[in-house]
């Protein structure tokens, strides 16, 4: 997890964060290419920039005070931050 980002290269990305209160949420995947997401060792699903969904669901039961999200991205796209949302996101992102 400590190598620098390289364009058009598959890679794993690690995000660690703390929560004071846990609840159901969605992780925004807009800006990422194609891959899958793990939350605290549990695979929550796959994403692809063409849609149809733009967010992945994270049930509160997977979250705790200290959390770890791993994103495997196959298209070499990268985002500095991840964002959680209260609502799901659907729609074609790219034709």
Image: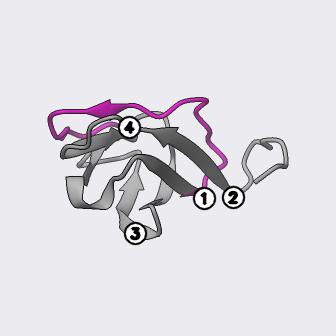
Residue sitting at x 61%, y 29%: 80
Frontmost of labels 4 and 1 is: 4
Sequence-earlier tag: 2 or 4: 2
Residue sitting at the far right: 3
The numbered disc on residue 43 is 3
Sequence-earlier tag: 3 or 2: 2
Q: Element under label 2?
A: loop
Q: Which one is nearer the viewer's eye here, 50 or 39?
A: 39
x and y, in percent, of residue 19 in the image: 38, 37
Sequence-earlier tag: 4 or 1: 4
The chief SS type of the magenta part is loop
In the picture, measured across the screen, residue 94 lies left or right of residue 80, that is left
Residue sitting at x 33%, y 53%: 63
Q: Element under label 1?
A: loop
**Is residue 78 highlighted in magenta?**
yes
Sequence-earlier tag: 1 or 2: 2
Q: Which one is nearer the viewer's eye here, 13 or 31?
A: 13
The part of the chain drawn in magenta is 72-95
Q: For mark 4, does the 10 Å Cα neighbourhood hold few (<14), some (14 to 19), or many (20 or more) residues?
A: few
Rounded to the nearest whole Å, what is the CA distance between mark 4 and mark 3?
Answer: 20 Å
Q: For mark 2, does the 10 Å Cα neighbourhood hold few (<14), some (14 to 19), or many (20 or more) residues?
A: some
The numbered disc on residue 74 is 1
């Amino acid at each position: 997890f400590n190598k620098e980002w390289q364009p058009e290269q598959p890679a794993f990305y690690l995000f660690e964060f703390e929560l004071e209160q846990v609840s159901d949420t969605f992780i925004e995947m807009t800006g990422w290419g194609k891959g899958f997401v793990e939350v605290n060792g549990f695979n929550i699903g796959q994403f692809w920039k063409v849609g149809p969904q733009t967010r992945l669901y994270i049930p509160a039961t997977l979250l705790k005070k200290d959390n770890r999200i791993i994103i495997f991205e196959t298209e070499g796209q990268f985002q500095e931050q991840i964002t959680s949302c209260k609502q799901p996101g659907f729609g074609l992102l790219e034709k």
